[in-house]
Image: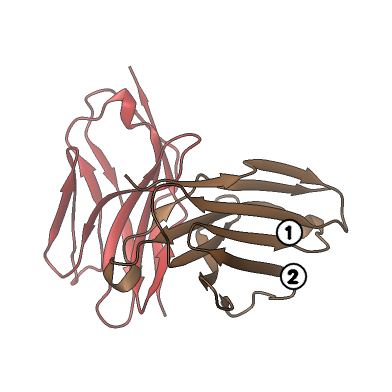
Chain colours: A red, B brown
Amino acid sequence: GNSVTQMEGPVTLSEEAFLTINCTYTATGYPSLFWYVQYPGEGLQLLLKATKADDKGSNKGFEATYRKETTSFHLEKGSVQVSDSAVYFCALYNFNKFYFGSGTKLNVKP
Amino acid sequence: GAVVSQHPSWVICKSGTSVKIECRSLDFQATTMFWYRQFPKQSLMLMATSNEGSKATYEQGVEKDKFLINHASLTLSTLTVTSAHPEDSSFYICSASKPRDSFQETQYFGPGTRLLVL
């Protein structure tokens, strides 16, 4: 079947620290992979995506590489800001459906 | 932009009553809307997919008589939790896709509605 596992939070970092949020998946076929971000009181927003193996999605300093050999799509950012504090969801899209991870809350302290 | 709103943002009701949640696409027409449910510290789970003017398609294990979905227009879908019980307490999220977006990969999410059934 299709499923997504991401690291539990919360993750607390100081401003300018390096961020990694792990995400692994199981899927049949050839899914697309996504990271969504949810700021307080708002809906999920697409952060980045990758549609095939070895693709790298990037946006706003965040990056994630579609690794088929390790079935992973880890989210990274070199220097986080307080404004990056939010909940991050890893997701895969396969056969016209989304499958989400449970979300990782990121707290960035000044 | 592509903004999706939900109303109400949170609701408390008594056991046995029905609750209606609205999902609106504010600046685009949505041919397809999706309803998700999220329990604390768990994934968003797709409940059903609704297309304007036709019956919703429910995921396995979701009671269609319990969770009534109506997609009466291209900008509005409603989810009614009928005869709500405490186990229905959850966070309900809708999303919408635009007609021209292929494979419905691009979905725009509402902010969610938190339901508490006493």
| Res. B78 image quadrant | bottom right
**Residue visible at 74% across and 75% down?**
B65
How packed is label 1: few (under 14 Cα within 10 Å), some, or many (20 or more)? some
| Res. B20 image quadrant | bottom right
Horizontal side, residue A99 vs residue B11: left or right: left
Could you tell me residue A104's position as x and y percent?
42, 45
User: Could you say which is closer to the camera, residue B106 or residue B25?
Assistant: B25
Could you tell me residue A96's position as x and y percent?
37, 76
- Marks 2 and 1: CB-CB under 8 Å? yes
Horizontal side, residue B19 vs residue B1: left or right: right
Which residue of the protein is positioned furthest toward the top in this rendering?
A110
**Residue visible at 27% across and 83% down?**
A29
Residue where numbered disc 1 is placed: B88
Tell me the chain of label 1: B
User: Could you say which is closer to the camera, residue A1 or residue B38?
Assistant: B38
Dot placed on the residue nearer the N-terminal end, 2 or 1: 2
**Which residue type does callout 2 highlight?**
Lys
Tell me the chain of label 2: B
Disc 1 element: helix
Distance between the alpha carbons at the discs numbered 2 and 1? 10 Å
**Which residue type does callout 1 highlight?**
Asp
Residue where numbered disc 2 is placed: B66
